Amino acid sequence: MLMDPVQSLVKGLADKYGRTRESLLPVMQGVVQQEKYLSEYSMVEIAREMDIPASDVYGTATFYSFLETQPAGKFIIRVCKTITCAMKGKNQILFSIQDMLKIKVGETTPDNRFTLLETNCLGWCHKAPAMLINDEVYTDLTPEKIREILSGYIKKSI
Amino acid sequence: MAYSYQLKRVDFIFKNENNWEKVLATTIKKKPEDIINELISSELKGRGGAGFPTGLKWKLTAEAKAKNKYVICNADEGEPGTFKDREILSRVPYKVLTAMAVCGYVTGAKEGYIYLRGEYKFLEEELNKAIEEFHYYCKETNLDFKVKIFMGSGAYICGEETALMESMEGRRGEPRNKPPFPTQAGYMDGPTVINNVETLVHTFTIFEYGAKKFYDLGVQYSRGTKLFSVSGDTPKPGIYELELGMSLQDFVYEFGDGDTKAVQVGGASGFLVPRKKFNDTAIGYQGKLVGISLPTGGSMMLFNSSRSMFNVLDNYLEFFREESCGQCTPCRVGCQQLLLGIKAVKRGEKPASYLEKLLRLTETMQYTAKCGLGQSVANSFSSIVENFREEMIY
């Protein structure tokens, strides 16, 4: 029988990390890396492959803010909203991103390229404001820098 | 007369990384008891913020009888205003690995883990390269110790040691009841040493130079140096290694912008110190130097008079509300109600005296919450509300 992409992804990850409970986070992280989020289907698939109750997989996934359970775009933008970034102009950064991408916080662009989120302290308070795009860090942000960075990503994803 | 101040800058953490092979080789020739005694006599305390004596932690784990023991390096640096652990792991990773291996040698642990927060995933590749080279060295010298990275996924509470272990075991990061403490039953129920990144680096300094050199730095009860993460309204934000025990006034002379209204010591879970108390506050562990002494994981956030303390508290409470794991009621409901409460007072929907009710709620949380998160919300809440009451109301 031919396996669908999610099935074979989950199987590959379970082969790599193991099928015990300690491997659950690495497996889920691997799925998110590839698929950008954990769909109900992929969570059930993980549960089946690792022989863990699906409710436990869901319960664990929803605990962690980086394990998205909602559909997300190719590039997930996480803008830090904790105190120092908030003091150093986080709102202006958000405005310029929203202005460029025409989405609000929590939304994904219709072409599924960008998701905009706010997040808690990223650990770059000395270079605030800061944001992550997927795993990449950007610091000392200004609206001008935002335009530059996002233009780069827009070109990259065409 | 000009006030003369003294901040003792030191430079141990970021230098001499190249010595690691030598330090490792000479240290593991000593008896485990001698290494533990060295650590105990240095009076090194945990640098993550809680301040547990490191030597004692290693000793308890070494004495525990079990087949599998573990060493965990806690790099889930999530406290607002802290960014030192990332800097250590990216600049001197071999020091951390050496310290973990020595800890393994002392306690009998063969496996080590670095729990790296999801926000620092970009460090993973470089760190894995260092681990690979380190393993090669271990193999050459017949040292039976392996280190793996475990990635977190964006949860502040996983910095709490038992929540971190739950997370590594594939579950929600909800803190466990203590006892048993990790030194008896930690990761996978094995005796576990879990140390902050910076604590491990300080053990390296002690192995390299001896306990006395470390002990001679700092003040009584607060020995050695500490990395401070300085941010907020300061002309020179960044990371600084300073001797412990300085007065907050001296700190503000060095790092303030001339208009410093308050300093948050120890991040959102720490204390806010207003200008009038700078002189009476020292940075270190318990024991009195001048007035109160505040421990810190190294987060120092400065606020000048353009900042509204209401906004600051509002930001902290939103942080705690989101990061509370939700397991125990005082913390889950408490954080929500505190946030709603201060907003209601600000809008005039509740009288100013409602603040006293909220203060009593933080007191209840301090006594009844299961872990440090819920217990420490009272720190910033009471220190802000009591010192800046007007800003909360008007």
Image (spheres, rainbow, N blue to C red):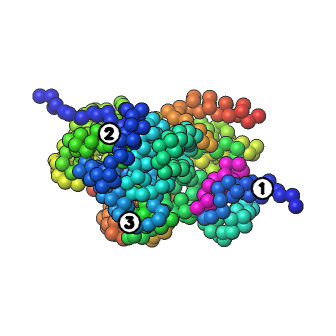
Mark 2 → mark 3, Cα distance in angstroms: 27 Å
Chain assignment, label 3: B
Query: To which residue does mark 1 refer?
Result: A8
- Mark toward the viewer: 1 or 3: 3
Q: Is residue A27 magenta?
A: yes
Residue B157 forms part of the magenta stretch: no
The chain under label 2 reads B
Q: Quadrant of residue B369?
A: bottom left
Residue depicted at 61% across the width and 59% down the height:
A23
Amino acid type for the residue under numbered disc 3:
Ala
CA gap, disc 1 and disc 3: 43 Å
Instruction: Depth check: give the residue in front, A116 or B176.
Output: B176
Q: Secondary structure at mark 3?
A: loop
Q: Is residue A107 left or right of residue B1?
A: right
Tell me where residue B267 appears, x and y as whole percent.
37, 49
Q: Which residues are magenta?
A: A22-38
- The answer to which of marks 2 and 3 sits earlier in the sequence is 3
Depth order, front residue of B293/B41:
B41
Q: Is residue B221 above or below residue B130?
A: below
Q: Which mark is residue B208?
A: 2
Q: Chain of mark 1?
A: A
Residue B64 tag number = 3
